[in-house]
Amino acid sequence: MERTQLLEVLAQVRAGTVSPAEAASQIGALPFTEIAHAVGSTVIDHHRELRTGVPEIVYGASKTPDQIASAMRELARTEGGAIATRVDATKAAAVSAQVPEATVHELARVVTLGTAPPRPRCARIAVVCAGTSDLAVAEEVSLVAEFLGAPVTRKADVVVAVAGMEAALPSVLGGLVDRPMIAVPTSVGYGVSIDGLVALAGMLSSCAPGITVVNIDNGVGAAVAAVRVARLAAAVPSEDAP
Amino acid sequence: MERTQLLEVLAQVRAGTVSPAEAASQIGALPFTEIAHAVGSTVIDHHRELRTGVPEIVYGASKTPDQIASAMRELARTEGGAIATRVDATKAAAVSAQVPEATVHELARVVTLGTAPPRPRCARIAVVCAGTSDLAVAEEVSLVAEFLGAPVTRKADVVVAVAGMEAALPSVLGGLVDRPMIAVPTSVGYGVSIDGLVALAGMLSSCAPGITVVNIDNGVGAAVAAVRVARLAAAVPSEDAP
Amino acid sequence: MERTQLLEVLAQVRAGTVSPAEAASQIGALPFTEIAHAVGSTVIDHHRELRTGVPEIVYGASKTPDQIASAMRELARTEGGAIATRVDATKAAAVSAQVPEATVHELARVVTLGTAPPRPRCARIAVVCAGTSDLAVAEEVSLVAEFLGAPVTRKADVVVAVAGMEAALPSVLGGLVDRPMIAVPTSVGYGVSIDGLVALAGMLSSCAPGITVVNIDNGVGAAVAAVRVARLAAAVPSEDAP
Amino acid sequence: MERTQLLEVLAQVRAGTVSPAEAASQIGALPFTEIAHAVGSTVIDHHRELRTGVPEIVYGASKTPDQIASAMRELARTEGGAIATRVDATKAAAVSAQVPEATVHELARVVTLGTAPPRPRCARIAVVCAGTSDLAVAEEVSLVAEFLGAPVTRKADVVVAVAGMEAALPSVLGGLVDRPMIAVPTSVGYGVSIDGLVALAGMLSSCAPGITVVNIDNGVGAAVAAVRVARLAAAVPSEDAP
Amino acid sequence: MERTQLLEVLAQVRAGTVSPAEAASQIGALPFTEIAHAVGSTVIDHHRELRTGVPEIVYGASKTPDQIASAMRELARTEGGAIATRVDATKAAAVSAQVPEATVHELARVVTLGTAPPRPRCARIAVVCAGTSDLAVAEEVSLVAEFLGAPVTRKADVVVAVAGMEAALPSVLGGLVDRPMIAVPTSVGYGVSIDGLVALAGMLSSCAPGITVVNIDNGVGAAVAAVRVARLAAAVPSEDAP
Amino acid sequence: MERTQLLEVLAQVRAGTVSPAEAASQIGALPFTEIAHAVGSTVIDHHRELRTGVPEIVYGASKTPDQIASAMRELARTEGGAIATRVDATKAAAVSAQVPEATVHELARVVTLGTAPPRPRCARIAVVCAGTSDLAVAEEVSLVAEFLGAPVTRKADVVVAVAGMEAALPSVLGGLVDRPMIAVPTSVGYGVSIDGLVALAGMLSSCAPGITVVNIDNGVGAAVAAVRVARLAAAVPSEDAP
Amino acid sequence: MERTQLLEVLAQVRAGTVSPAEAASQIGALPFTEIAHAVGSTVIDHHRELRTGVPEIVYGASKTPDQIASAMRELARTEGGAIATRVDATKAAAVSAQVPEATVHELARVVTLGTAPPRPRCARIAVVCAGTSDLAVAEEVSLVAEFLGAPVTRKADVVVAVAGMEAALPSVLGGLVDRPMIAVPTSVGYGVSIDGLVALAGMLSSCAPGITVVNIDNGVGAAVAAVRVARLAAAVPSEDAP
Amino acid sequence: MERTQLLEVLAQVRAGTVSPAEAASQIGALPFTEIAHAVGSTVIDHHRELRTGVPEIVYGASKTPDQIASAMRELARTEGGAIATRVDATKAAAVSAQVPEATVHELARVVTLGTAPPRPRCARIAVVCAGTSDLAVAEEVSLVAEFLGAPVTRKADVVVAVAGMEAALPSVLGGLVDRPMIAVPTSVGYGVSIDGLVALAGMLSSCAPGITVVNIDNGVGAAVAAVRVARLAAAVPSEDAP
């Protein structure tokens, strides 16, 4: 239940047009009702950004090209810009055919559309990776971070370290830098390191304290986390934050 | 090789008392040499804080009470204060007998000694947890964060969420807050959730983007990561950081 | 050995045309004999519904389009209606070509044929899911439950909660409702949550007591379980049930 | 936020003593606030039963004998009776010393105190198990179900099947009965079946449709789930349930 | 339902004192009824040998010394002899105190009592193992096989191969002998081979065809399997076996 | 080193044309030499049957159609008949094109050629399976067993039980029959039971003693093991076997 | 930072054109800077051989044919020869079209180009494998070892043993030879041994001491390790090595 | 079959006192016979060193103090010196009481006795480790290597790298040195890295080529492997080695 809806209900209580009991039922039923909504249609959550500071990012892996294209168009119409991730080459071609003005980032499997609206002030983010095989995920991090308004530079206040195989990179960096570092394991490897589980576990086990980790290949999650830190670093710390 | 050592070598090169070739050998040999040092004795790394911004935290799990006690005394003598983690009840009693002025935090399995020196300015950190079984790890996070100079409060700029079992807490919070959130899985549970692997995997899989995760029961790592973010949030973002 | 067969044998014992020893051999040999039957042909078990209250549901994943089509036709002929699950797009097209009057439910990968016969009275079932990626399994649950005679509504006596990724949905709902809840993990996710094992383990580990779980993507199992509860809820509890 | 608290806030909105904006903040902040409460003390959730139909059951595994004893005394004082599970022999002796009127059920590792208050009407539950090694968990199911007001009998409307090792029991029963069946895997076994994972996976994979499963050794969860079904079976199905 | 019970019921049907319908109910209800029996008491299944050719072997791991002692005494009284496995040193001492005439086989963790009755004719069994660490399980195999009436010799018709670690022994033997070979993985090892899973998997993957495998440390299972083969080898093959 | 080669060397020692030291070197070097042979060419091991009682069975999964066809032709030429397993539809068509007189068994993915030579006398084998999905593996067992000279019948001295999913079949049969039983897990299933690991583990954990198990989908291994038992059952037990 | 770069910086310090502080910054920043370089382009590390004794080997699995072809051409131009591994048939055809003078080794999935330059003196290496299915990896080992200048022969100072399935080969050889042995598990197998994990674990668990192991299918790693040993064996042991 | 036994048999063949057929039987039966020997007694294999170059090292983990003490005494009597590993504090005290002249190395859990006999010439070995928690295993490597005659120094021809947690050490060293490197993962860690599996997998996945790995905590295996390389490095490479 968005704050606006809630305020509306409360205003009706104030005005006496809705009883407290009725209002309580409406408020209490919400979590269940809202979740149940999900059955039957793809709903774009336009209020997500107000609540979490992050706009909807279209996750392409479990959507058809049609769903991706229409979600991106709708987001671009209302928000100014849209970004979709995990869009493989075949899907990207189909999306491109429907939305010719979209830009396809092949290596990163990302599609962008329009111009992202102005975002909160944000410190700089560095994205480093261990090998050429990790470039795809690193580029996904960069594109999403830039879409969220973060400058991606070589010298930075927050570091995102992307690595597959045995993922020694974050441990090495972790002993050299004193900035927040977010590690992204990639599904690069073979034999025991197939699927990125060894890279993930290695990062979690790092002797260098203070490294935090996201899911395997989760460039979007790392970008959002880095942007949250970078926004905080660019703001005067508030006194009465939640 | 600490910067001071390196500067010394370079000054000798400048002075002509050491040849570039000799200096190159000394510098090149360092990683190997330093690591090899480790065989044979427990060395306290007093320069760690200069490099990474975090002082040595004594990891009690793999040390005897004697080793814990002498490491803490040495750190308190040189740094003003010391903290040791993973000190179980039996070890804590033995440490306490040797260092009576130390304070034992039983639930958190933490021992503190002396007064931590002044640390960099730091924004506020919140530590929340899902159930009474997670309190031990949550308290470890709080004690380490406070030792590193962070005020731990209910309203904060950075959130550390501690949870075991299915670890739904970070997902729920992740949809409500727009601050950096660090999730700590705990080894609370039984059956399939024994050892915290399910909590860890659940946090990594969270639909709420931007959550980062540390190893199971890794209160120290979460505290260090949160402090790094909180220090950044309290500082004016630099233009030429590494 | 169906009850009717058994009664026939017993009647022959009563009549003296079969000796007790012979009858004992026939009865005792049955489990082994019946199982051995399975080698060599696909047999439709028409008596299954009498015994378990659930008619045969054609499991399409391990059958050819020919096998699916002929099993559905035979069931529709004798029972009035048939339903097949796990029928992917390619198989569904082939089945449709052979049985044009069948209805293909593409997202749910379900094919239905004819009109299901009247079933026992049944209370209402709600099917909720966490995201658009889980809709396919949720729809499978709904279609099977309706085929078994259950009204699927938003307000209900039994809740089926479908979720992938970290599967926090059942935990959240579990703290809000007091009805039986059956959770279905889905194979939606990537990295550590690939294949649904994390969703499954998270549901089993839920802090909210009273949630029961079925296999990953097992929409049929959840529907049958929900229908059994809903039928019970719609019946006057018997005094001498098994 | 309990409904009573919510109604109070809404009444204040109606009365004009609290503004809609203030009320919205209070309501919106609640999930975060309530969870944060947990840090620092063991709080008994007296309203849980109103919300979920199930009173607090003391989980002894992660509590000291002191915590178990005081929680049980407080619950018995306010509710009339209390039950604690996973209380091993050593803890049970210590609890018994503090609460001599408590009854210790050694095999089931359960402690009960006082007389449970009247509960909603409830159909009968059967608890069956595969071997003597599974009796402990089966007895835990029975004791908790009876504490929740369910008659545990041999012939019943709901079946709880408890099994370890390869857990063939539910598959065998599943082909014979048409009632809801809840399966509980137990951590009985050795070699590959150690820890109950094989029993769990076998139950989830059962060919007999309609079996639902709880976590390994989770007698409490099975009892709560069975009681929810049995209560539903004993009630006239409502028209406007959630 | 034992054949004798079944014959009795059938005789009553013949005599007209029980109706076919009543008899059908009794027969049909049996599996459920019998399993339900298990809840509440340890029942010795005296008819097991008639049905499966193998008498009850007391599994000591999940029983108290009292339960072991009384089960063995009862079996020795009715059968002439008894054998219990997985009886560790502490339990064995307690059993010995209660049943002084029992023989404790310390390494094998086996206790025997009395003289096993005459068994069917049986060919010879060889038990070989890879190292001294596997001797305990090998001796368990030998003792159980001998209790079942099998001569254990060096040259034999059936080979039981016991091995831990990487378990290369059965592969090596499998290329040299043409007799049935049963492999028993043991939980001997450390690191990746801890718990015997590597030995088990290696035996299952053996390039030498025709090796069959039992659970880790399952000396009883291997002995029973070997005895079944050896009895068959000693008998004239029947024409109408099941 | 085949016995014939060995005898030749020994004859030369006898004749004095080879010194004992030279002979020892030749014999000692053999295992290493023979294994090293494998690098560079596919060698058919014609002596395998003499040593292990089982002729070469062509394993098609890791061979090209050309390799399968030429191996089968060579074996048929020298032995009279040949059998290849794991030959999928595409490969089978290619093999058939090259060897038109071969018979393709599509479901079992088996190709046979010519007439197997007379084999040792052999008792009867029964092959039972749990569902239609397991028929492919069951048929592989039957075809290989028949190729090895075993009559496959419904009533038998040895039972091969094939099952996927939770694999309850062998446990059920294991309580009813007293013959050697070999269980074959199949990779039939989905969710947690994908790949047959649950079926395998369930069979190894069976409460019914005396069941032995082969690798997942290993119809060849089960057939060879069953034939070894059945040959033993058909022979007069020897006094001085290996 | 290559030694040459370092010497240059140090010469500038000596010459007074760079201050020690500036030099320290350059040296200290290097690891971070160098790793960050990787984002954005595929850089060939020409100095790798000077540092590690091993030239760049192109890893084809994560590269496009274009990337493989241009990397090989550049390496052949500067080094005289190049080798690429994990180049499947489709990629190899595409590479061949661009670089017609390259040689494709189909079974080993290796492509070579030009003539490798003279390498350090090297003792002989033997490569043995267990079955025809392991030939591909064995050939990869041989080709890479020869590219690095090692003679691959049947009698040798270092043994590389390649095996899949249960991988008994290294254990058997390990008891017969006294030379360094490197074991390579292969991803040959099915059921429990799929993906080579069982072969890997079996090799690590081998009772024969002194066997070392590389990742599954890692022919390159085994070749490099063997060459390092063989070079050492061919050299006079130095007195002042690192 | 030791070479001496074999020569004896061959001499008898030469002399005509044993026929070739009899000799072939004796030689052919050996593997089976020898392995069967193991059942019933702990045999010290005095010829092991002749065959594999490595004397028997007593593995204490699966032996009683009595067995350790008598094996060490026997080895010291015949060989001059003995070494036992995995002897925990309790066992070491018991061994020491029986063999007062033995030396206990507490941290390494090693016991040594007497003076090792002269061994083959051997190059130098370096043992490095990542942290104080890995010292125990590193010391085990050093003690065993020295017992086998290897000088353990800081600068060396072969490097043994010991590391737990995420095990980044070998990857870092692997990019700096050109000598053979053997990596030993240790069971140091918690959470996901418990038991050393992550360290093992990380080492196997290392991007630095040429690192070989032994089992977790397998200091003995690493020492033997390093000694084999170092002996080879100290010898003139032979022309006709196996």
Image (spheres, coloured by chain):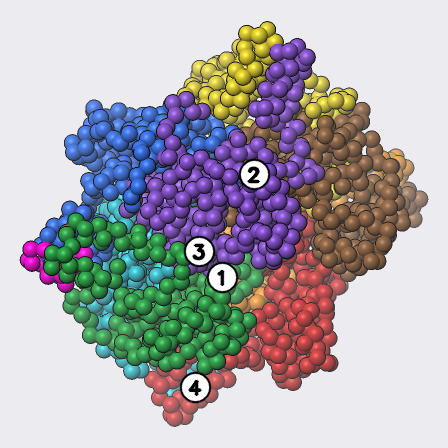
Chain colours: A orange, B red, C yellow, D brown, E purple, F blue, G cyan, H green
Q: Are marks 2 and 4 in contact (CB under 8 Å)?
A: no
Q: Which residue is mark 3?
A: E135
Check disc 3 and give the amino acid type: Leu
Give the quarter of the image for residue C42.
top left
Distance in Å between CA atoms under marks 1 and 3: 28 Å
Check disc 2 and give the amino acid type: Glu
Q: Are marks 4 and 3 in contact (CB under 8 Å)?
A: no
Inspect this view and state whether residue D132 appears: yes
The spot of residue E144 in percent (x, y) is: 48, 45
Q: Are marks 1 and 3 on the same chain?
A: no
Check disc 4 and give the amino acid type: Leu
The spot of residue E19 in percent (x, y) is: 67, 12
Q: Which residue is mark 2?
A: E79
The image shows residue E167, relative to residue C31, as above or below, that is below
The range drawn in magenta is: F14-27
Q: Which residue is mark 1?
A: H196
Q: Nearer the viewer, mark 1 or mark 3?
A: 3
Look at the numbered disc 3 and give the secondary structure of its residue.
helix
Label total for image? 4
Sooner in the amino-acid sequence: mark 3 or mark 2:
2
Distance in Å between CA atoms under marks 3 and 2: 29 Å
Chain for numbered disc 2: E
| Label at residue E20 | none
Check disc 1 and give the amino acid type: Gly
The image shows residue E37, relative to residue H84, as above or below, that is above
| Label at residue B10 | 4
